[in-house]
Image (cartoon, grey):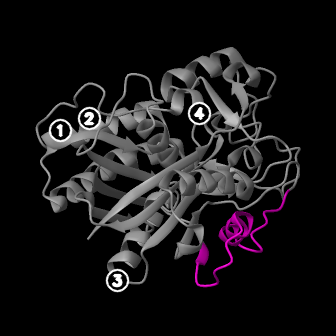
Amino acid sequence: MTIRITGSGSYIPTRVVTNEEFAKHSFYDEAGVPLTYSNEVVAEKFKQITGIEERRYVEENMLTSDIAYKAAQRAIEDAGVDKEAIDYIIMAHNFGNVKQGAIQTDILPSLAARVKHSLGIKNPKCVAYDILFGCPGWVEGVIQAQAYIKAGMAKCCLVVGAETLSRVVDPHDRDSMIYSDGAGATIIEATDEPGGILAHESASFTHDEAYFLFFGNSYNKELNPDVRYIKMYGRKIYEFALNHVPLAMKECLDKSGIAIDEVKKVLIHQANEKMDEAIIHRFFKLYDKTPPEGVMPMSIHKLGNSSVATIPTLYDLLIKHQIENQEINKGDVLLFASVGAGMNINAFVYRL
């Protein structure tokens, strides 16, 4: 028995928000002091560091559970499975449903329950639950699905990652330009085909790192102090990721028994182009290697950072030949890796 991704789907919102659209924002520093340089300079520096030119936001009438359902439906159709045969629905997100203009999150019922309801699944033994694991949530969901299947508790799982970060960003914080909305989903099944998931690695660093990402006040001190927004210590996250993610990736690859030269693609969380490039170079350097050209497909330039949705969306686009100058084929080895709030790190090695 092998455990494989048998279907994938994604939902990419249609609303495109370019860097230029932030020109009308009033940006402040953490102390609430207006930035001394123009928004044009902010946007240019932002693009140089992150690689992001534009991002996607959901329409006003849509929620995280709505786009999660759309991605899930596409994954089920792609896999050709009977929805009533799904044993687990594992829904990764971080902020629940936040309506346009609202200041509360809604996770009652869970988003997984809402997705199951929208899919019209009647089987009560299809267990639906949410996980909060930062940006690595979808990867962790896949690891959990694999564990259920290995233990004989399941044969088919639906793992979804969705987020509407546009609803929880501070418009006065330049870091808000990183975030976007989106959803990705996969069907994970027990099969007789060779390959599949070969090894995985997970870790949570919480002693000094737990609050590198957090909910905090707007940088505009005139706004309601009881309304919170996603905040981060970017430099600390960058240094943490460079020091720990390559090592986790190496531990995972070594555990799989696969040689570094066999790795065709690295699908890493689309957080920041420069950070991802640095992680990849450090990872290959651990083997005294240089990353092959094109080893790291990217979607961040046009889609931004949609947290848990970035990797499943990237995989769906890649497997369906929608990433320019990128291709994967049967038998190729992929290394999935992510890092995010918590601080959490995970990875898994997968043979197509």
Q: Compared to 149, does 214 lie above or below?
A: above
Kindly identify the residue that appears in the image at 39 percent across and 37 percent down: 276
Circle 4 packing at 10 Å, graded few (<14), some (14-19), many (20+), is: many
Please name whichever residue, 191 or 29, is drawn nearer the observer in this view of the structure. Answer: 191
Label ID, residue 281: 2
Q: CA distance from mark 3 to mark 2?
A: 36 Å
What amino acid does circle 1 point to? Lys
* Residue behind mark 3: 151
Q: Is residue 251 left or right of residue 33?
A: left
Proximity of marks 1 and 3: CB atoms separated by less than 8 Å = no
- Residue 2: percent from left, percent from top: 27, 66
Kindly identify the residue that appears in the image at 50 percent across and 21 percent down: 48
Q: CA distance from mark 4 to mark 3?
A: 37 Å
Figure quadrant of the N terminus? bottom left
Kindly identify the residue that appears in the image at 34 percent across and 56 percent down: 347
What amino acid does circle 3 point to? Ala
Q: Compared to 151, does 228 lie above or below?
A: above
Q: Is residue 313 left or right of residue 217?
A: left
* Residue behind mark 1: 285
* Residue behind mark 4: 303
- Residue 348: percent from left, percent from top: 32, 57
Extent of the magenta region = 103-129
Tag nearer the camera, 3 or 2: 3
Q: Secondary structure at mark 1?
A: helix
Q: Mark 4 or mark 2, which has the lower sequence index?
A: 2
Q: Secondary structure at mark 2?
A: helix
Q: Secondary structure at mark 4?
A: helix
Tag nearer the camera, 4 or 2: 4
Q: Mark 1 or mark 3, which has the lower sequence index?
A: 3
Q: CA distance from mark 1 to mark 3?
A: 36 Å
- Residue 227: percent from left, percent from top: 82, 56
What amino acid does circle 2 point to? His
